[in-house]
């Protein structure tokens, strides 16, 4: 028997705000909310076919490039339209040393966590 990826925990300064951003990006909903922790996920909730995200309060700011990041793909529009939607939600372009020839966009969420917008629609 193997393990299954069920949730990703993200330390952040403002769990409610960051959970709201990622819920809008992924079309997730709030599954649970406590003072220092917010969990978001798909309608199926925890344990479903895709992982949930848990945002927990941390007092230290993010420093340096993340060693783990999220990749997202558009589902109902092309990459350019999805890029604009993510920027409108509060994402910002990020420079992590890309050449400009990549087929993806590197962005930061409102707390500076890098993530990539891929070209492939799923």
Image: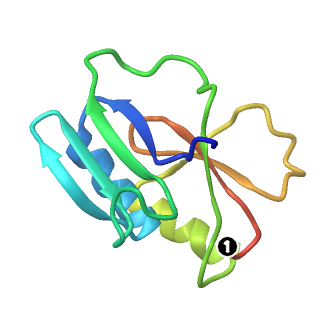
Q: Position of residue 50 (x, y in %)?
A: 51, 60
Mark 1, other Cα within 10 Å: few <14 / some 14–19 / many ≥20 = few
Task: Say if 9 sits above or below 88 in the image.
Answer: above
Q: Is residue 81 visible?
A: yes
Q: Is residue 36 left or right of residue 84?
A: left
Q: What residue is rendered at 58% in x and 72% in y? A: 82
Q: Most extreme residue toward the front, as rendered?
A: 1
Q: Is residue 62 above or below residue 29?
A: above
110 lies above or below 105:
above
Q: Is residue 6 left or right of residue 1?
A: left
Q: Label 1: state its secondary structure.
A: helix
Image coordinates for residue 71, horizontal then vertical, percent: 64, 52
Which of the 4 image quadrants contains residue 48? bottom left
Image location (x, y in percent) of residue 62: 44, 22
Q: Which residue is mark 1?
A: 80
Q: At 65% from the left edge and 66% from the top edge, which residue is drawn?
A: 73
Q: Compare residues 68 and 118 and report the one nearer the observer.
A: 68
- The residue sitting at 24% across, 36% down in the picture is 14
Of the 4 image quadrants, the one containing the N terminus is top right
Q: Is residue 88 visible?
A: no
């Amino acid at each position: 028997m193997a393990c299954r990826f069920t949730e990703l925990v993200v330390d952040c300064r403002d769990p409610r705000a960051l959970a709201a951003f990622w819920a809008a990006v992924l079309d997730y909903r709030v599954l649970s909310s406590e003072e220092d922790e917010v969990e978001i996920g798909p309608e199926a909730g925890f344990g479903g076919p895709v992982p949930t995200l848990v945002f927990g309060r941390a007092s230290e700011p993010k420093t340096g490039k993340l060693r783990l990041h999220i990749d997202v793909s558009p589902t109902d529009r092309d990459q350019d339209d999805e890029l604009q939607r993510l920027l409108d939600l509060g994402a910002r372009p990020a420079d992590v040393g890309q050449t400009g020839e990549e087929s993806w966009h590197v962005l930061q969420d409102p707390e500076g966590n890098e993530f990539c917008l891929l070209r492939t629609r799923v």
